[in-house]
Amino acid sequence: MYNIADTFIVGRFLGENDLAAVGGTYTLTTFLYSIIIGLFMGCGSLVPYCFGERNERRLKGCLNISFLMIGSVTLVAEPITLCFSNEILKLLHTPMKIMLLTSDYVIIILSGVGLCFYTLAKEPLLRLYFKKKS
């Protein structure tokens, strides 16, 4: 849905080159998102089990390790991708005509990923509370 909205808005209001730049980042962003989503899915298999057991200590450990692992991958992958975005885009055969626009869009998208992870880590609504049995 995000890509459809992005394509519609950029194509309609910014123009052909900007739309090509958005499309040119698709392979790179899909690759990075797939890594992060895969980590979330892997971590998501043990977390519900611990929650269902009402094992608060084990659940907190799973959540902490999950955030640490996903955060570490994000903190490593994003700067590397940002530092080498032009080289990566050249490997993806991005036309020189839209290289600057595409590179700018990669920076915007990856900044959003880091911001989302930070927000998730700080969100008090995501903290779990167990009711003690009377």
Image: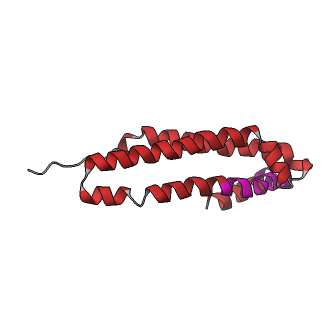
Q: Is residue 9 positioned above or below 129 on the image?
A: below
- Image coordinates of residue 32 in percent, x first then y, are 65, 52
Nearer to us in this view, 27 or 18: 27
> Where's residue 23, x and y in %?
77, 57
Numbered label tally: 0
Q: Is residue 85 left or right of residue 66?
A: right
Q: Nearer the viewer, residue 7 or 134?
A: 134
Predominant SS along the magenta part? helix
Is residue 81 positioned above or below 133 on the image?
A: above
Establish if 95 lies above or below 111: below
Q: Nearer the viewer, residue 6 or 12?
A: 6
Residue at the (40%, 43%) spot, across then down: 64
Q: Is residue 124 above or below residue 31?
A: above
Q: Quadrant of the N terminus?
A: bottom right
Measuring from the top left, give residue 88's x and y in whole percent.
Answer: 79, 48
Residue at x-position 62% and y-position 40%: 76
Q: Residue at x 60, y 55 (%)?
A: 35
Please check the rendered image and state whether residue 16 is part of the magenta-colored stretch, yes or no: yes
Report the side of 45 relative to 129 (left or right). Answer: right
In the rendered image, residue 18 lying in the magenta stretch gets the answer: yes
Q: Residue at x 61, y 54 (%)?
A: 33
Determine the residue located farthest toward the left in the rendered image.
Answer: 134
Instruction: Give the colour scheme of this rendering.
Output: secondary structure
Magenta region: which residues? Answer: 13-31
Residue 34: x %, y % from top left: 61, 58
